[in-house]
Image (cartoon, rainbow, N blue to C red):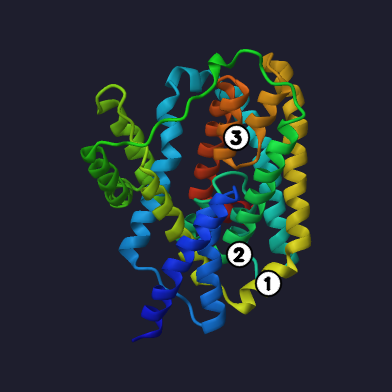
């Protein structure tokens, strides 16, 4: 029996057990964290990387792209376009803080943290998508995964605490409802097909970050062709599988040296995360005034990530469509910046 086979025999059940317990305890991103812990523990103890099968990894990234695309299919294009100007302004402010923080991380440790690694680590939003993006763009996906999960954890824990002290909208009729997972077998086949076909199709069309943007755009394109009321929301098992795969890939590549590099940057990383959260909270004040909505809605709309937590709080608190619209506009902006990151870095380096 090879070391890799033994590793998977240990890591798969350990990841499921850890993910189930963390999910039962309402820990944010439980399945992702559980698989990172299980795979990372094995990689550190065995002092060897745990390699994820390329086809399995491709399917996992495909499901992540579909999950990211589902909110786009729920909001009419006209409504999304109506929020575009203010959404671009808000996105620019929060993304700029992440970009500056990423560059500063690179300059503090240029030997260990590249510009791509620093920026992808601190871009707000899309935590589950950033490690695959980092891998695609040649950045250190392990450092990116650790930093992004730290931000996700801080935002996920702080959001309900802060939102609990804010005044909620009185009318809950405008809240964004969450789609039910698909139950028809033929829809499951379409979801799997999109997850597998999205990447090669995007590469054929020269779309950047094909593993994520390919399934995302294909999901958005196929949804209008389905019968009314049918959504491509992956079943819970598909979602768990996607997060487990991403966690295995990130955790399986951990080493003592990578953890030491991450620890060296921890104070600066925490400072930037705190700055991003503070800037978003301050941005929410003028945003609430411009949109004529509550600070609760503006605060959720500008939250730097933890989209699932944002949508849940938005639905429970009766927030309007602005929360989803502004979060999606920033998510699209983050993906576009990440997709063309090497070209942008080369452009500014020449200048």
Question: Would residue 38 appear left or right of 113 to someone viewing this image?
Answer: left
Who's the residue at 57% across and 59% down the image? 145
Who's the residue at 62% across and 45% down the image? 124
| Element carrying mark 1 | helix
Q: Earlier in the sequence, mark 1 or mark 3?
A: 1
Residue 153 or 161: which is nearer the viewer? 161
> In this rendering, is residue 214 above or below 7?
above
Q: CA distance from mark 1 to mark 3?
A: 31 Å
Question: Would residue 333 appear left or right of 203 to someone viewing this image?
Answer: right
Nearer to us: label 1 or label 3: 3
Q: Which residue corresponds to mark 1?
A: 261
Task: Examine the image and state in which quarter residue 59 appears.
Answer: bottom left
> In this rendering, is residue 62 above or below 134?
above
For the N terminus, give its image quadrant: bottom left
Q: Which mark is residue 245?
A: none
Q: Which residue corresponds to mark 3?
A: 310
| Element carrying mark 2 | helix
Q: Which residue corresponds to mark 2?
A: 143
- Residues tagged 2 and 1 counted as in contact (Cβ below 8 A): yes
């Amino acid at each position: 029996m090879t070391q890799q086979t033994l590793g998977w025999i240990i890591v798969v059940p350990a990841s499921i057990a850890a993910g189930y317990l963390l999910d039962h305890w309402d820990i944010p991103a439980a399945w992702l964290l559980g698989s990172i812990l299980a795979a990372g523990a094995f990689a550190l103890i065995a002092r060897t990387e745990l390699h994820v099968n390329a086809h399995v990894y491709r399917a996992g990234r495909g499901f992540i792209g579909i999950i990211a695309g589902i909110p786009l299919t729920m909001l009419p294009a006209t409504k999304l376009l109506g929020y575009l100007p203010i959404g671009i302004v808000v996105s620019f402010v929060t993304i700029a803080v992440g970009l500056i923080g990423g560059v500063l991380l690179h300059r503090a440790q240029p030997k260990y943290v590249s510009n791509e690694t620093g920026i992808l680590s601190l871009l707000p939003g899309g935590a589950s998508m950033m490690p695959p993006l980092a891998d695609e763009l040649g950045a250190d996906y392990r450092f990116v995964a650790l930093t992004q999960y730290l931000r996700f954890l801080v935002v996920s824990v702080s959001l309900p605490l802060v939102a609990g002290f804010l005044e909620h909208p009185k009318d809950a009729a405008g809240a964004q409802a969450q789609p039910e997972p698909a139950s028809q077998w033929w829809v499951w086949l379409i979801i799997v097909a999109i997850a597998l076909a999205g990447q090669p199709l995007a590469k054929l069309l020269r779309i950047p970050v094909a593993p994520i943007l390919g399934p995302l755009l294909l999901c958005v394109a196929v949804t209008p062709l389905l019968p009314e009321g049918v959504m491509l929301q992956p079943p819970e098992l598909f979602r768990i599988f996607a997060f487990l795969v991403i966690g295995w890939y990130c955790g399986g590549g951990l080493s003592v040296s990578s953890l030491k590099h991450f620890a060296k940057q921890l104070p600066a990383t925490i400072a930037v995360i705190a700055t991003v959260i503070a800037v978003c909270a301050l941005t929410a004040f003028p945003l609430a005034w411009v949109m004529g909505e509550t600070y609760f809605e503006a605060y959720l709309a500008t939250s730097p990530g933890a989209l699932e937590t944002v949508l849940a709080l938005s639905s429970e608190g009766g927030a309007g469509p602005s929360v989803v619209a502004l979060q999606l506009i920033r998510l699209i902006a983050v993906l576009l910046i990440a997709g063309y990151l090497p070209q942008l870095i080369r452009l500014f380096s020449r200048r």
